[in-house]
Amino acid sequence: MSAHPPLTQNINRLSRLELPGAGQVTVQGNHTYVGHIPNKAGLGTSILDVSDPRNPRIVSQIMLDDPESHTHKARVVGDIMIVNNERNMTLIGRKADELPGLRIKLRERFGRAATHAELADALNVREVDIPAVEAAEKQPYDRGGFKIYDVSDKTRPRLLCHQKTGGIGVHRFDMDENYAYISTEMAGYIGNILVIYDIRNPVKPQEVSRWWIPGQHLAGGETPTWNGRRTRLHHALRYGDELWAGLWHGGVGIIDIRDITRPTTLGMYNYHPPFPEPSHTFMPLEKPIGGRRIALAIDEEDHAHDAEELDRRKGRPHGCLWVMDVTDPAHIQALSSYEVSELDSPWSRATPGRFGAHQFQEQRRGTMVYCAWFAGGLRVVDVADPMSPREVGYFIPDPAEGRAAPQTNDVFVDDDNRIYMVDRYAGFDILEHAR
């Protein structure tokens, strides 16, 4: 732990563990489940005993069995835990996917097979990287999906199933005791779509249905109106008989699942452009305010910043929190937004790192919203007045050792209003809101 106290207002730190960087934190009862971002140790998931929030302790850890994959998201219901299985980001990215079509185009242009130098120039990679791209083409990634564990014994999680999906695999997701609402790539589609699985037999999940944004189903003859994978499902959360979806550069959407075998779209709202950062999470409040149904959306500050990137983005709005009127799902309206000033964090322009919003807690806690704000730390916002969100607390941890800025990544708020927070680089904090 740093020798310097964190910057805070109305938030107290109960404890901290120097865990490796994480993508998601989930709490159930006296245990916390942390999904780790790729790390040198090969750690996938940590299970912690938090019965004493001032003294959390590691109960067990699951190591990765595949160096190409990560499991940085974790959800738990009862004795069942699901983690994602997604390909690590690499310098060559998806270049292998482009090779077959590119070879044809270059042969037509040159009247011969393209050289490695010509392929590299067209792919915007180094010539020395082309053998790695060709190797990835010959042996594409096929381990994307999700894993289901029995965690009835927290000291010995037991793998029940590795359900494979497609593409680079599963990103974020939701689950309940009956179904998993998976955001994943699938063959024949461009970008992540929703695939719902019946997990009542966790050893053998069964696909129930799919939902996608019109234009994603290439194999079905659809043509996207956007470039690449910019418009796609980030993830969808279930509240009642609806799923609330962040759609990246496609905005937000509400999906009716009263018939779970046939999800239907109730409404979508896209504010891109003019706003540049993609929609991450969408969630309705528990109760109407002033006779209106209110929902929250949050954008993700998408790019890691270096000095050149920061200079390029001058004058561009950061990712922020949105308050929306969703009384009529077919006509969603933005009411207000909340943004943290760069003056409100000493690390707002530190490089490398991100400053804007990322994620809020997915547990509905009245009108209080606990937001993970990258270099802005944790921001607590009250939306009791939907037209005027008001910050009522914050907690900015020091950067992890050797890092330029904190990168607060995910937050969970339990039924006792304790706050569990993880950083992309390192650190797990348990906090409380001093009201």
Image (tube, rainbow, N blue to C red):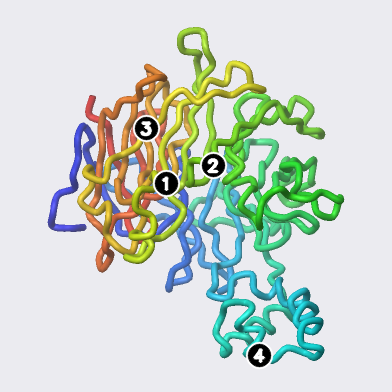
Closer-to-camera residue (78/92):
92
Crowding around mark 4 (Cα neighbors within 10 Å: few <14, some 14 to 19, many 20+) is some
* Quadrant, the C terminus: top left
Q: Give the residue number, with chain letter if any, for mark 2.
A: 273
Query: Which residue occupies the extreme right position in the image?
Result: 220
The amino acid type of the residue labelled 1 equals Asp
Residue 166 appears in the figure: yes
Residue on which the image places disc 1 = 410
Q: CA distance from mark 2 to mark 4?
A: 38 Å
Task: Identify whether 357 is placed above or below 138.
Answer: above
Which label is found at residue 298? none
Give the labeled residue for mark 4: 116
- Above/below status of 30 relative to 286: below
Report which quarter residue 251 is drawn in.
Answer: top right
Q: Work out how far the residue at label 1 is from the one at label 3, CA to CA, in angstroms.
A: 18 Å
Residue bearing the label numbered 3: 338
* Real-space Cα separation, disc 1 to disc 2, in angstroms: 26 Å
Q: Quadrant of residue 173?
A: top right
**Circles 1 and 3 in contact, beta carbons < 8 Å:** no
Mark 4 element type: helix
Say which element carries label 2.
loop
Give the residue at x 40% y 19%: 387
Q: Of 206 and 186, which appears nearest the observer?
A: 186
Viewer-nearest of labels 3 and 4? 4
Q: Amino acid at mark 2?
A: Pro
* Amino acid type, callout 3: Tyr
Q: Position of residue 97 (x, y in %)?
A: 71, 71
Q: Residues within 10 Å of mark 1 (few under 14, many from 20)?
A: many
Closest to the camera, between mark 3 and mark 2, is 2
Among the two numbered marks 1 and 2 on one chain, the one whose residue lies closer to the N terminus: 2
